[in-house]
Image: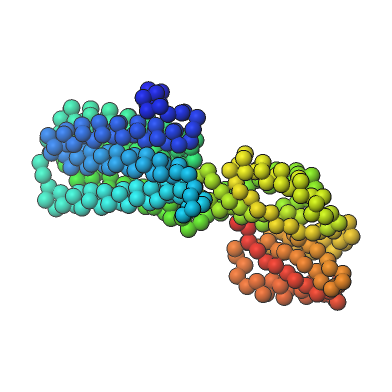
């Protein structure tokens, strides 16, 4: 692997170069295996071996797509795409999943045709050895690619690794069918071809679903969000932080927003310096462009009311927490936010129930209740 880094002048510590080097390794390995399998499969009249060879050739194409997608994703932001091109990697994964699904379809169609119109097999010890060697190589290559995909946070690379490792399991089934034929003179080759095809289709579906989830919008990364919450809450002058939203513009590029609770007696000038420094730190260390919203809170004078509301929340299964409590005495208005889970559909009912509860102790108090769900 170090030779690939050296020949192509890549940096093993850079995310883009890790993906590129691993993709190049996949191209070389899969082309070699594919060529060998197709030749041996044709000589042995083995549908399963030829199917595997075709699948390996497809792996080379998907490795090339991953390489090109990574290069495009690394382009600098411009007027047309101010957040950069990071999401190109998701489009690459989408194309890869479609290729895998199409390959699986063609393979299962061929296998079914051979069940209906069986052909005589020509299984040899050489063909079994070739497939066995391929299985070992693909298993090692698959695990390595998955490892590098996780290291570089590349969904496309992880998908390649999973498909590659599946190939090693598929090769094992092919070897079993060949041995059965040699020992019992029973051809289960076409049926194994069906199993192989179903495994390929399963992988394609999983990659497609995972990619579509990313494009539609998943919850923000919990690990990243926890780190950011810790940074924010440890900043001098900030009481707490809630309502974080993270928008993914690629595997390592985010924009986000978060509401921070500040002492209502503080002026903007008193807290600006710390918040601005925090914003720069989050940008440089976490690659997140963060925007802050501000809640003014009075923890000391509102403690009794907080405890009363906390009692209500603790008894409600689907209300997870509350925040942004602010009492405007001049308007006799209480401002409050609830965080609820996705099981709650009727927000008006939640507001009605809480208002009735609040009126038991604070009958003359007006209420502005905002109900939200967690995004990360």
Position of residue 46 measured from the top left corner of the image (x, y, whole percent):
16, 39
Left or right of 197, for residue 152: right
Left or right of 240, for residue 375: left
Residue drawn at 48 percent across, 36 percent down? 15
Of 290 and 178, which appears nearest the observer? 290
Q: Quadrant of residue 328?
A: bottom right
Position of residue 60 measured from the top left corner of the image (x, y, whole percent):
29, 38
What quarter of the picture does the N terminus occupy? top left
Q: Is residue 260 above or below residue 67?
A: below
Residue drawn at 86 percent across, 61 percent down? 302
Residue drawn at 87 percent across, 69 percent down? 329
Residue 183 seen from this side: no
Q: Residue furthest right?
A: 301
Residue 12 seen from this side: yes
Model colouring: rainbow
Position of residue 40 measured from the top left corner of the image (x, y, whole percent):
16, 33
Left or right of 355, for residue 73: left
Q: Is residue 360 above or below residue 227?
A: below
Of 30 and 244, which appears nearest the observer? 244
Left or right of 85, for residue 26: left
Position of residue 85 measured from the top left corner of the image (x, y, whole percent):
46, 48
Instruction: Please tell me how many numbered marks the rendered image carries.
Output: 0
Residue drawn at 41 percent across, 44 percent down? 72
Q: Is residue 58 above or below residue 35?
A: below
């Amino acid at each position: 692997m170090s030779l690939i880094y050296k020949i192509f002048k890549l940096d093993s510590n850079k995310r883009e170069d890790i993906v590129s080097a691993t993709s190049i390794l996949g191209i070389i390995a899969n082309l070699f295996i594919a060529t060998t399998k197709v030749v041996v499969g044709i000589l042995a009249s083995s549908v399963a071996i030829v199917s595997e060879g075709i699948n390996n050739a497809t792996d080379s194409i998907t490795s090339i797509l991953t390489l090109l997608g990574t290069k495009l994703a690394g382009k600098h932001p411009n007027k047309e795409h101010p957040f950069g091109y990071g999401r190109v990697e998701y489009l690459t994964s989408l194309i890869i999943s479609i290729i895998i699904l199409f390959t699986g379809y063609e393979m299962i169609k061929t296998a079914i045709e051979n069940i209906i119109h069986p052909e005589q097999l020509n299984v040899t010890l050489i063909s079994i050895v070739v497939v066995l060697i391929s299985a070992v190589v693909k298993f090692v290559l698959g695990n390595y690619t998955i490892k590098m995909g996780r290291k570089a946070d590349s969904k496309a690379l992880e998908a390649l690794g999973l498909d590659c490792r599946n190939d090693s399991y598929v090769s094992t089934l092919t070897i079993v069918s060949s041995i059965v034929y040699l020992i019992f003179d029973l051809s289960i080759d076409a049926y194994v071809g069906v199993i192989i095809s179903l495994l390929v289709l399963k992988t394609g579906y999983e990659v497609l679903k995972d990619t579509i989830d990313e494009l539609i919008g998943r919850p923000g990364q919990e690990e990243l969000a926890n780190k950011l919450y810790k940074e924010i809450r440890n900043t001098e002058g900030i009481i707490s932080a809630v309502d974080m939203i993270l928008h993914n513009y690629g595997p390592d590029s985010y924009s986000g927003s978060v509401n921070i609770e500040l002492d209502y007696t503080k002026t903007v000038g008193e807290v600006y310096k710390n918040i601005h420094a925090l914003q720069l730190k989050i940008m440089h260390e976490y690659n997140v462009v963060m925007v802050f919203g501000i809640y003014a809170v009075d923890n000391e004078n509102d403690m009794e009311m907080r405890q009363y509301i906390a009692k209500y929340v603790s008894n409600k299964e689907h209300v997870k927490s509350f925040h942004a409590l602010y009492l405007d005495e001049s308007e006799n208005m209480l401002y409050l936010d609830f965080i609820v889970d996705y099981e709650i559909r009727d927000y008006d009912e939640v507001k009605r129930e809480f208002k009735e509860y609040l009126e038991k102790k604070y009958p003359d108090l007006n209420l502005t209740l905002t109900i939200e769900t967690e995004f990360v």
